[in-house]
Amino acid sequence: MIKQFDKLTQEEIVFLLKAPILFSILATSNARELSKEKKADAIKLSHIKTFTADPILLPYYREVEDKFEKYFEEIIKEYTPFDDVKRNALKHEMDSLNTIISKLDKDYSKILHKSLSNYAEHVRKAERSFLENFIFPVPLLGITD
């Protein structure tokens, strides 16, 4: 168990472990369903995050990585098809994340919140086209920004 999560209920802990998955799905669910490629990208990103996170978050991201595929499948089943009603329900669920994070130690909560925000931004950017990511890897005004 992650020592910073001592003040949380089991339900809140599970929700925090699902947070990167919720961000991944929300960011990539513009279509009515999630492709195998997008699923694979989200799983790959969860593995990368384990190695790039702030050291204080490593136990958290290891736990996320261990449960990612299981929780990913559960959430996909719950929110498919990704229509407006389901996307709004997913957004509503994400709103409770800040309440749970606020129960954590102040320093840890700031680091976790920043990390999850960076994760969400990275997932959104991963949705950019091949042209933007590989032909123009450096932002160019008017082309990629």
Image: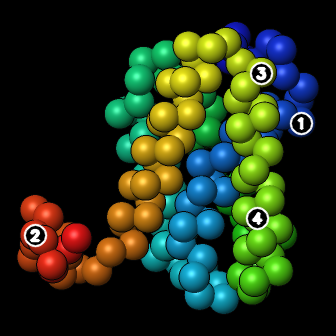
Q: Residue at label 1?
A: 11
Circle 2 residues within 10 Å: few <14, some 14–19, many ≥20: few
Camera-nearest label, 1 or 3: 3
Kindly check if marks 1 and 4 are in contact, taking CB atoms under 8 A apart as contact.
no
Camera-nearest label, 4 or 2: 2
For the residues labelled 1 and 4, the Cα–Cα distance comes to 17 Å
For the residues labelled 1 and 2, the Cα–Cα distance comes to 44 Å
Q: Residue at label 3?
A: 103
Q: Residue at x 54, y 67 (%)?
A: 27
Kindly check if marks 1 and 3 are in contact, taking CB atoms under 8 A apart as contact.
no
Is tag 4's residue or tag 2's residue first in the polypeptide sequence?
Answer: 4
Q: Residue at label 2?
A: 140
Q: Residue at label 4?
A: 90
Residue type pointed to by label 4: Leu
Kindly check if marks 3 and 2 are in contact, taking CB atoms under 8 A apart as contact.
no
Is tag 1's residue or tag 4's residue first in the polypeptide sequence?
Answer: 1
Residue type pointed to by label 1: Glu
Q: Quadrant of the C terminus?
A: bottom left
Percent from the top left, x then y, of residue 49? 43, 40
